[in-house]
Amino acid sequence: MPVAVKSTKSLTKLDFSGELNIYTASETMDVVKAALKNALPIQLDLSEVSEVDAAGLQILMTIKLHSTLHGVAFNLIGCSEAVNELLGLADLAGFFGEPTVLSGIAA
Amino acid sequence: MSLDESLQIYIMESRDLLEQMEEALLTLEQNPQDEEKINAIFRAAHTIKGSAGLFGLDFIISFTHVAESVLHKVRNGEITIDESLVALLLEVGDFIGKLIDHVAESKTPDADTQAVSDALISRLNVYLSAESDMVPAAEHAATEVAAMTTVDEAESIERVETDCWHVSLRFGVNTFRSGMDPFSFIRYMKTIGTIAHLETMQQGFPALEEMDAESCYLGFEISYQTDADKLAIESIFDFVRDDCEIHILPPHSKISHYIDLIEKLSNEDLKLGEILVKCGTLTPNELESSLQQQATQQAMDKEPIGQTLVNQHMVQPDVVNAALEKQKQVKETKNSESNFIRIDANKLDELINLVGELIIAGAGATLVANKTANSEMTEATSTISTLVEQVRDSALALRMVQIGSTFSRFNRVVRDVSKELGKEIRLEISGEETELDKTVVEKISDPLTHLVRNSMDHGIESAEARLAKGKSAYGTLKLNAFHDSGSIVIEVSDDGAGLNRDKILAKAIEKGLVSAEQSLSDGDIYNLIFEAGFSTADAVSNLSGRGVGMDVVRRNIQALRGTINIQSQPGLGTTMRIRLPLTLAIIDGFLVNVAESAYVIPLDMVVECIELSTADYEASISDQRDFINLRGEVLPYLKLRDEFECKGAPPARQNIVVLQYAEQKIGLVVDKLIGEFQTVIKPLGKMFEHVKGIGGFTILGSGSVALVLDVPRMMQLANIGKNKEQEVVGVN
């Protein structure tokens, strides 16, 4: 499973791992949709993502846009090399409020 | 479309491009000033490289890049095209072809390939560096400065400040489903330029609940620094152009173009303006002025925007005209492209198989209709069979291709071989619009190559020998094709020395192929060169050692139900004539009966039908005389009854079907003539492959089987060539 939902009462935590790409996108999206129904603050951990492509990026962007729209907090706590590379390419590090310090530790 | 399919398209397109490149190079060799051809070559190399980037085929990119750099210099007139450069570029083309083959077989290049690649690159580099040696440095710098000043002057009209291209991309919703990754384009862009700024668009995104993870919502605004021209940047997006919105603005573009862009993507307009500022494409002032202009424009709404800008001296009219012209051209090429579709050959085969079954089923229906003697039913079935016939013809026409492309490939062969042999040989091609079945074209290419090489090697003499004989110094090789009674004829002729009849005969006797006592016609002796193991000893060269002997040539042609013969005149030249059936699948047949069995003769070969008179029949029994007098001409015939060893007595009235093939006439004696019949030729099983005179079978409407006669083989059986040479000559 490319995404594990570890929610608490006050937080929806999504741990992504492995391949986050077009092959897993549909499955991942279903999980994400179900997990985000509760309008709790969102925390993403991308430090275990080995591969990410445009389809994967879209999911992340949708989550971020969703949080902005509903006014819930969004927090990215870790990024793998692969994610960093793509965010750099798409110049979206600022958009996600990428934790440069944290990613440094994670990597 | 999956990635695999796109890759297949890439492979096919690259091969087409390489062919065009080769053709252009050969033209250039004759006429080095032809700028259009230089551009064509450059474009071909460029497109191959560009598209390779999409698939991450780095070995193609890195090699083609060097070639492209050389071509770039050629295009700018910095290097002049000469014979050795053309030769090198031809090799480069071949090598790219090899790399494409690697891709097709999904292999990566091995060490050998790499070595060839390195060797070619170092030879190409000679041109890249030699150029700077030729022009003294100072002078070079001076021209450069001069060039820059002119550019500056041209650029001094009001334009935006940035020196970056602006690329605006909105990917189509099905981009992922087509197997494309938007970032592969971005990554590729980075290899031929620098992305100064990239903004990922968030506008197109749906709400979380409506998001379909397999649809693409991405869009980018990119500020891009590169030396590539617009065409090159456009070509990056060749594979997604159809369903994506792509706008490319050159550096120092007129503000109007940005207004256009903003208008086109108007649902995002204000946001887009901001993004352009963000990308550094526009300064805030520029944005403001352009939005203002846009507003005024909408208020007036009378003059087209281009006009307004011209009036305001913002854009030179020439520039607008040029842009319009360019747009028109692009449109036109797109239109002509859309006239063709690529179809999987298997689909065509399937269609033709189905048409075949339809014909058989139709024949069954007609038979039933005739039996019931219901006139309405008969009429209906006859209408259907007319239509089926038309469907059959157009289905078969789909498979027909012109032989021209096969012929033009020989330009290269002739060029290379003549260089190798040190002979000057010109190729003349005619009848290139002649059409034949695609499968036949594919299979004829190899034998044809061998014949061409053979003619050049053995046929055409050296320049000195030619001059001594009073001929022109250069030899001429002709390729010709035409249709003739249901077959296609392909001729390879040279104006060389002709075949040496005595030498061939002596050799054949020595090899034990014929005995010294046999009396043979010239044609028979020439045909001996097609025997296995035959080679005139003093004529062996490295060209003949290609593994395809003349016997293989003949076998290949026979496998296509074709024949080959040779005409030669000592001192004047040789003509080799290949005759092939037009199609391998469905023909118009002529149905006849012999002793209760049905046979089909290809209708195209049938000339007429006559009665075998009792007198002639009796003569054939009493004196073994198997020919008749047909209006003063001798017509030899074969009795199918005897040929197929049918039992029982012949009917009182027998008929002769007169056939013509390869300028010979022959009669076949049959019991009963039935009539025209659409024939779907089915191959015989392995067991019957060697039955002589039968080319296949077909299924009649009644469900019974009819054998299809192989007329060329029948003629050989009749041995007309050998025993009746004199009479046959008389016939024609």
Image (tube, rainbow, N blue to C red):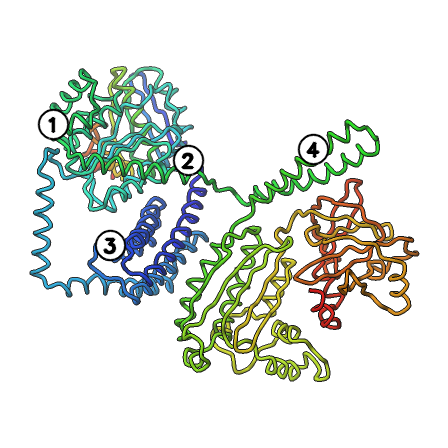
- Badge 4 crowding class, 10 Å Cα cut-off, few under 14, some 14 to 19, many 20 or more, is some
Mark 2 against mark 4, which lies toward the viewer?
Answer: 4
Which tag, 3 or 2, sits closer to the chain's start?
3
Q: Mark 3 lies on which chain?
A: B
Please tell me if label 2 and label 4 are on a single chain.
Answer: yes
Residue ID for mark 4? B384
Q: Toward the viewer: A88 or B530?
A: B530
- What residue type is disc 2 on? Ser
Q: Which chain carries label 4?
A: B
Residue ID for mark 3? B75
- What residue type is disc 4 on? Ile
Which numbered tag is attached to residue B312? 1
Q: Where is residue B207 in the image (x, y as percent from the top left)?
A: 33, 19
**Which residue shows up at 31% across the image and 16% down it?**
A9
Please tell me if label 4 and label 1 are on a single chain.
Answer: yes
Q: Toward the viewer: B87 or B272?
A: B87
B33 left or right, relative to B605: left
Q: Which chain carries label 2?
A: B
Q: Mark 1 lies on which chain?
A: B
Which tag, 3 or 4, sits closer to the chain's start?
3
Q: Toward the viewer: B234 or A94?
A: B234
- What residue type is disc 3 on? Arg
Please tell me if label 3 and label 4 are on a single chain.
Answer: yes
Q: How far apart are marks 3 and 2 (CA)?
A: 36 Å
Where disc 3 sits, the SS reads helix
Mark 2 against mark 1, which lies toward the viewer?
Answer: 1
Which tag, 2 or 4, sits closer to the chain's start?
2
Q: Are marks 2 and 1 in contact (CB under 8 Å)?
A: no
Q: Distance between the residues labelled 3 and 4?
A: 59 Å
Q: Position of residue B650 (x, y in %)?
A: 90, 56
Q: Do the residues labelled 3 and 4 touch (CB within 8 Å)?
A: no
Residue ID for mark 2? B178
